[in-house]
Amino acid sequence: MKTFPTSAVWYFGILFISVSLITTESSEVQVVGPADRVVALAGDDIILPCSLKPNVSAENMTVQWTRLNLKGTEIPHLYRDNRDSYADQSTSYKRRTSMFHEELKNGNVSLMLKRVTLSDAGSYWCFIPTLMKETTVQLFVGAVSQPVISINGTKDWGVVLKCESGGWFPEPEMEWLDSSGTILPADGPLERHRDSEGRYTVRRHVTVVNTDTNRFTCRVHQTEINHLKETEIHVPDDVFPKLPYRWKVGLIAAAVVVLLAASILFFYSICVYMWRKHTEKEIRQQMEEQDHPDHPSLVQ
Ligand SMILES: *[C@@H]1O[C@H](CO)[C@@H](O)[C@H](O)[C@H]1NC(C)=O
Ligand SMILES: *[C@@H]1O[C@H](CO)[C@@H](O)[C@H](O)[C@H]1NC(C)=O
């Protein structure tokens, strides 16, 4: 019996070696994302990092940026046949994405996403079908805004200040501070409200009394996105409550009465003292005259 033809052995041998080489090469190349999630603010232009390690060229590969969310699968960006392919792109990402074409030869397949919105937050999948490899990139989107301070009337001897800041995500903290940076006790807890887009509006009142600077600061901060916004107000002196007129008249009248009473008491005490001094002197004179009977008038 004739064994396998030599050519066939060679054929299968070469095929086997090629397949193992290709498999080895593709299994060595990794698709790598960032170590941490990407944190952005609404409105920012950001990069979702993704690259091949070792850095083989991705120019001739297909790169599919996919997003998995509740609505299903969206395709923010697709690179295929050496160019960007917009046919299957999700409408919400239209004209907002791009890849760095000059970086593809270095295996850099990062995605540029412009004007991010809160609804862009989530998991992105950087998938290279050519290699059957992928990685995920987490995008966290926050939103901030400048707090607004208003004077909300007076209470007792103080002025009530209101601070409000809308459009935050995630929910922030709000504090009132004096000019030296000390946290002031607010009038009650933080008031919060969430709109249909998921953004938070926070509000807090404080009653302040007249200080030497009359400067007060409202601070809003969010630790997850590491952002802080402050607004300062200078409350004019004349905004602080004055003594009412009736109180003023009453206080002056009371002061006059007290003064009058004090003066009367004072004069009365002086009179009593003088009178006592005078009588004492008379008594002493009388006693002296008794001791010296040569005085004619006192001879009995
Ligand atoms: C990729 O490797 C080449 C050398 O092979 C090097 O010149 C280049 O800087 C590398 N690029 C990156 C993004 O690491
Ligand atoms: C990929 O290219 C972009 C744009 O030049 C750059 O900002 C980013 O750092 C690159 N990423 C890597 C991993 O080299």
Image (tube, helix red, strand yellow):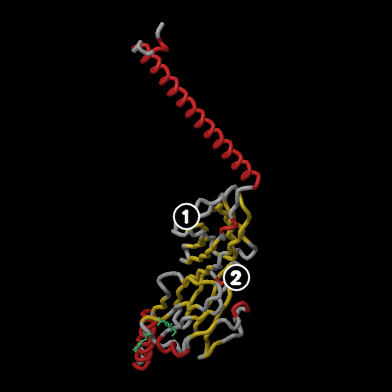
Judging depth in this view, the residue of 158 and 12 nearest the camera is 158
Residue sitting at 42 percent across and 89 percent down? 105
Q: Residues within 10 Å of mark 1 (few under 14, many from 20)?
A: some
Left or right of 194? Residue 290 is left
Q: Earlier in the sequence, mark 1 or mark 2?
A: 2
Is residue 99 something that shows in the picture? yes
Q: Write down the residue under mark 1.
A: 183
In the image, what residue type sits under mark 1?
Ile
In the image, what residue type sits under mark 2?
Gly
- Give how far across and how far down residue 231 sits, in percent: 53, 65
Q: Write down the residue under mark 2.
A: 72
Q: Secondary structure at mark 1?
A: loop
Of the two numbered discs 1 and 2 in the rendering, the one whose residue sits closer to the viewer: 1
Which part of the image, by quadrant, shows the C terminus?
Answer: top left
Residue sitting at 58 percent across and 56 percent down? 161
Q: Quadrant of residue 261?
A: top right
Q: Quadrant of residue 201?
A: bottom right
- Residue 81 numbered mark, or none: none
Judging depth in this view, the residue of 199 and 210 nearest the camera is 210
Residue sitting at 53 percent across and 90 percent down? 83
Task: Determine whether 114 is above or below 219 in the image.
Answer: below
Task: Spot the residue most to the bottom.
Answer: 7
